[in-house]
Amino acid sequence: MPEVWLPYGKTRVRLEVPSRAFLGLIEPREVPPAPDPLAEVRRALAEPIGTARLADIVGPGDKVVITAEDHTRSAPSWLMVPPLLDELNAAGVKDEDITVLFACGTHRAVRPEEAERLLGPEVLKRVRVISHDCQAPDHVYIGDTSFGNRVEVNKVFAEADVRILTGDIDLHYYAGYGGGRKSVLPGVSSARTIQFNHAMLLHPKARMGVLEGNPVHEDMMEAAKLADVAFILNVVANPEHEVVKAFAGDLERAFMEGVELVDEIYKVPTEGKADVVVVSPGGHPHDIDLYQAYKGIHTALEAVKEGGVIVAVAECPEGHGHKVFFEWMSRFKTLEDMEAEIKSNFRLGGHKAYYLMHALQKAHIVLVSAMPEEQVRDVFRLEPARTAQEGLEKAFELVGHDASVLVMTHGNITLPVLK
């Protein structure tokens, strides 16, 4: 009987799948990490794509803001920020003129212990570090996108002389890809600007792995250009969160080169769909809460048959993860009700409820987590289970013991693509 180990929080859990049922694994392509990740980051900084070197862009006295990903992401800011500081110092920019801004979007502020883990203690000693608050009263208006989005960004970010974005490029379920321009919108934008952008997720082109014609992505890119971003430093990592390659330079060109590598690693050809898909979002931080872990369910929809079962193996130690997500799942009973609310009164967090309701139209969903069973069943309409094995057994009970099974080990970052 095949044995599979699935990421679950900060550990792994074991699953046995009957040989007769097992169609195989859907996993990202195995790629070796850069032999020396710090050297790879420095190489990217020395060979920027589409721009001059950072040392030729900044000068003494410049106020510089560097964005960094927050606690919900696995971007190695601790690896990227110190070389950036060194480049800036070499160009005459003093540490006291540099601010690292956590691009939290709508997420909570980064806690002090998380900041130390994300950036490293030395960075905290050298420069000012703050978290973006999308509800702050002092956002700065910088212009409108062609979609009509009034772009308002963090005051410190707007008033800097030089703006640098850092992050990781990966697949995203309605922006197409994470990374690059996303550090501005939603990263350091106001709640109103973010809500306008995310309300476009109903568009048929607002899909994972799609950029052309995707209004969510295009609006984000326009917002980042309005912000006059000087330079980006992004990485693409393998499923073990090891840096494969770094991309630095122009906002758009460096990002697009990273996208090409993401496609090579994370778009996975599949022969067909299965009755049951067991999916792990990929462990911590991808399963820190249901709000984040849903992304694994979303990609599993591409591999499960209509009326099949998705078994999501996600610890969710912080519970559901978003107040509005919880409220919408409690308040609205149908997908149509949610669509109407998104069009008339969109609130961030509601989009996740909409996606979950949409997923439930296609498949049964079993959730293996640490969340209270009553909440899982009564609010989120999922079938709770305490172990992956129990989850698989429940799936067989729903669709029959002769069902076929596919297993996805890193659902948040993997896109099955039918051949």
Image (cartoon, rainbow, N blue to C red):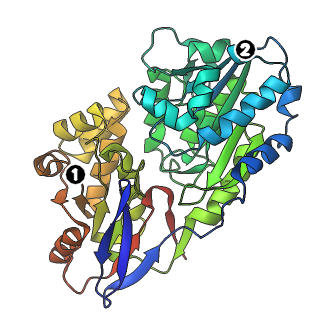
Q: In front: 34, or 296? A: 34
Position of the C terminus by quadrant: bottom right
- In percent of the image, x 45 and y 42: which residue is there? 201
The image shows residue 175 at horizontal and vertical percentages of 53, 44
The image shows residue 343 at horizontal and vertical percentages of 37, 33
Q: In front: 198, or 30? A: 30
Position of the N terminus by quadrant: bottom left
Cα gap from disc 1 to disc 2, whole angstroms: 45 Å
Question: Residue 63: which numbered mark, if any?
Answer: 2
Pointer 1 residue: 370
- In percent of the image, x 60 and y 38: which residue is there? 77
Q: In front: 5, or 132? A: 5
The image shows residue 92 at horizontal and vertical percentages of 84, 19
Categorize mark 1 by other alpha carbons within 10 Å: few (<14), some (14-19), many (20+): some
- In percent of the image, x 84 and y 14: which residue is there? 60
Q: Which label's residue is closer to the chain start, 1 or 2?
A: 2
Amino acid type assigned to the residue bearing label 1 in the image: Ala
The image shows residue 286 at horizontal and vertical percentages of 42, 50
Q: Quadrant of residue 281?
A: bottom left
Q: Quadrant of residue 224?
A: top right
Q: Is residue 95 above or below residue 271?
A: above
Q: Give the total number of marks visible in the rendering.
A: 2
Amino acid type assigned to the residue bearing label 2 in the image: Lys
Dot 2 falls on a residue whose secondary structure is loop
